[in-house]
Image: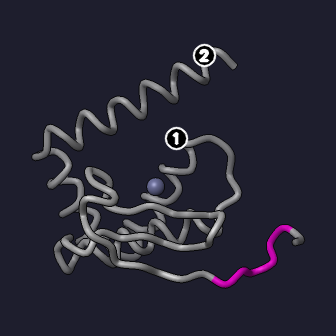
Amino acid sequence: MTPGTPRAWSVAFVEPKLLSPAYGHADRKRMVALVRADLPGCLKPNVLCHELFHLRDDAEGWLWRELRANVYAALHFPLGFVVGTLMTLGSAERRRFYAALIKSHVRRQGNG
Ligand SMILES: [Zn+2]
């Protein structure tokens, strides 16, 4: 496949236990955007937009890819971004989850 060639993708709303504490996941191998079915209605479109962005994004580096997807989804679904951010700030599990991901990313960057 040539870079930039559009690929078919699909969306699945899944049980929370499959992704928690994450809200979504982009499976680039299968081109599927997974979104937790239990999220509030205003958050689902933001998370879906975020995951679909990941499916098309060829940027390198986890943190850079997350920043790009978050900004893109926030510009398109700002209310969902605010609600998702507030839910994350209110969840110790999600704060620990993302702190561990960021630490792991920074550690890898330091070794590379
Ligand atoms: Zn992401």
Q: Is mark 1 in CB contact (under 8 Å) with mark 2? A: no
Residue at 34 percent of width and 78 percent of height:
13
Q: Residue 51: which numbered mark, if any?
A: none
Position in image of residue 8 (x %, y %): 67, 84
Q: Which residues are magenta?
A: 3-8
Q: Secondary structure at mark 2?
A: helix
Residue 7 versus residue 29 in the image, above or below: below
Position in image of residue 14 (x %, y %): 32, 73
Residue 42 falls within the magenta-colored stretch: no
**Residue at the spot of label 1:** 63
Amino acid marked by disc 2: Gly
Q: Quadrant of residue 62?
A: top right
Residue at 36 percent of width and 70 percent of height:
35
Q: Is mark 2 within 8 Å of ligand 1?
A: no
For the stretch drawn in magenta, what is the main secondary structure? loop
Q: Secondary structure at mark 1?
A: helix
Residue 69 versus residue 44 in the image, above or below: above
Q: Quadrant of residue 85?
A: bottom left
Residue 86 versus residue 97 in the image, above or below: below
**Residue at the spot of label 2:** 110
Can you say which quadrant of the picture contains the N terminus?
bottom right
Residue 4 falls within the magenta-colored stretch: yes
Residue at 66 percent of width and 64 percent of height:
29
Q: Residues within 10 Å of mark 1 (few under 14, many from 20)?
A: few
Identity of the residue furthest to the top in this view:
111
